[in-house]
Amino acid sequence: MAEVRPANVTARSKLPVLVWIYGGGFTAGGSADPRYNTSFIVRESVRMGKPIMAISINYRVGAWGFLASKEIRDAKASNIGLYDQRLALRWIHENVAGFGGDPDAVTISGESAGAFSVGYHLVGFGGNHDNLFRAAILQSGSALGPALNSIDHLQGSYQPIYDNITKVVGCNTSKDSLACLRSVPFEKLSRAFEPFVLTPVLDGDFLDKLPSQSYAKGEVADVAMLIGANTDEGTATFFGPRGTLNNETDVATYVSSLGRGLDSKETKTIMALYPDDPRQGCPFNTGNQRFAHQNGQQYKRGAAIAGDSAIIAGRRASAQYHALSKSTYSYRFDQPPWNGIEVLVATEPPVYSTHYAEICFVFNLDPELSRNNSNWIGPYKSYHHLAAQISNAWISFVHELDPNHDGSHLPQWPAYSTASPTNMVFTASGSHIEPDDWRAPQLAYWTEIWRALKT
């Protein structure tokens, strides 16, 4: 856990608290990553006259945090990565006042897997958040996203992984394989864990039902929300296939694998909603270019489907739900990296306004000190100005539950409304407000998929 606060803070200061949960696909990440340096956003909050403190928490990832099986289920040891996060939030609630923070003014935030984690805290334990936080910021992720496996239906997914690991480390013949695993040296177990990508499961406790069911039943923490996504989420390598979508059969095979598995009728509907028209594909607003040389003839079609299904549809549905009861603000980040490259998410261009591209802007990282970061903000003054606008809006939301008290000359950011839904569009050429009505049939259909318990 890393804590950053302004100078001269005392136990009586009662500063609003920003808690950061890093992403990394639930397989990597850490609060010490220099790309998540909260010093600059805290410094900016002081300059604004709205001081906050920031805390970055750690949690176990990969098989260390999300290994699942019938043995782990019976030991009630599933989703321990999420429990790490929850324990950190509880510790903050009980102790942050001693550091000058206000335990009743905590905002939890995260990006990618961090945002999915925030979403799971919103629906976790039946929506009972024990007043551990009053607001949530979700960047490129929500509870309404990729399908969660049920812990009672792991035979075709996680159980074989567990069985493979026990065999590799010599625990498969043990009467109690889990106890045996716990005795294996760290280095040996780590090597056995390396090949596997594991994510949270429905464990019957922290997550006792699909998030779509939690939303349908109203079992969601009633807190203020700031949520958004990047225009071209689907260009991230790990959301959609690259170089493999060249014809209708390729696309149909890919689509049918999404969620918990889509049937032929659903696959056909999705393919009709996302035709093979590069003008409608992702990266968006790139006309008839297909970027086929390195990515496949129907890459843009697949990238549009990938981004909407994994990130963007969940952003809209979450905003629509939370706006019914609490102040909610939605954004679309529409600024490509300064050099067109985002090392983390794609091995080669085009990435455009891809996943993770907003991170350096949110943390308003010092342009010189962060020059060696893989996501350096770049040399352009317009980019630095945009970073100030975004970080100031985040600070205002943490401090006031409203991003409009930032003094950064952004347009007035309307609270999200189901009657007149809008997004703040962040771009270096001039941020502005847009109606949140684009791709309505496509995003609405993903909501239908969720209601059919396909995610």
Image (cartoon, helix red, strand yellow):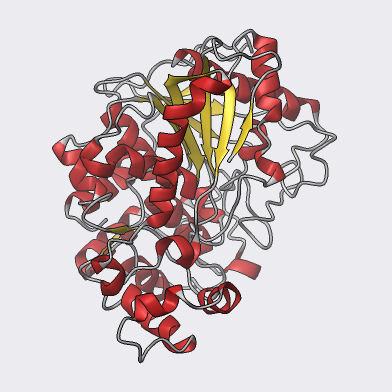
Kindly tell me whether residue 117 is visible in this rendering: yes
Residue at (83% x, 36% y) in the render: 369
Kindly tell me whether residue 336 is visible in this rendering: no
Relative to 220, residue 205 above or below: below
Q: Quadrant of the C terminus?
A: bottom left
Residue 443 x, y percent position in the rendering: 32, 44
Left of 365 or right of it: where is 434? left
Looking at this view, name the residue that lies furthest to the bottom.
173
Relative to 400, residue 79 above or below: below
Residue 182 x, y percent position in the rendering: 44, 73
Q: Nearer the viewer, residue 42 or 315?
A: 42
Residue at (28% x, 43% y) in the render: 124
Relative to 27, residue 119 above or below: above
Looking at this view, name the residue that lies furthest to the left.
217
Residue 289 found in image quarter: bottom right
Residue 283 x, y percent position in the rendering: 56, 50
Q: Nearer the viewer, residue 440 or 160?
A: 160
Relative to 407, residue 3 above or below: below
Q: Nearer the viewer, residue 356 or 46?
A: 46
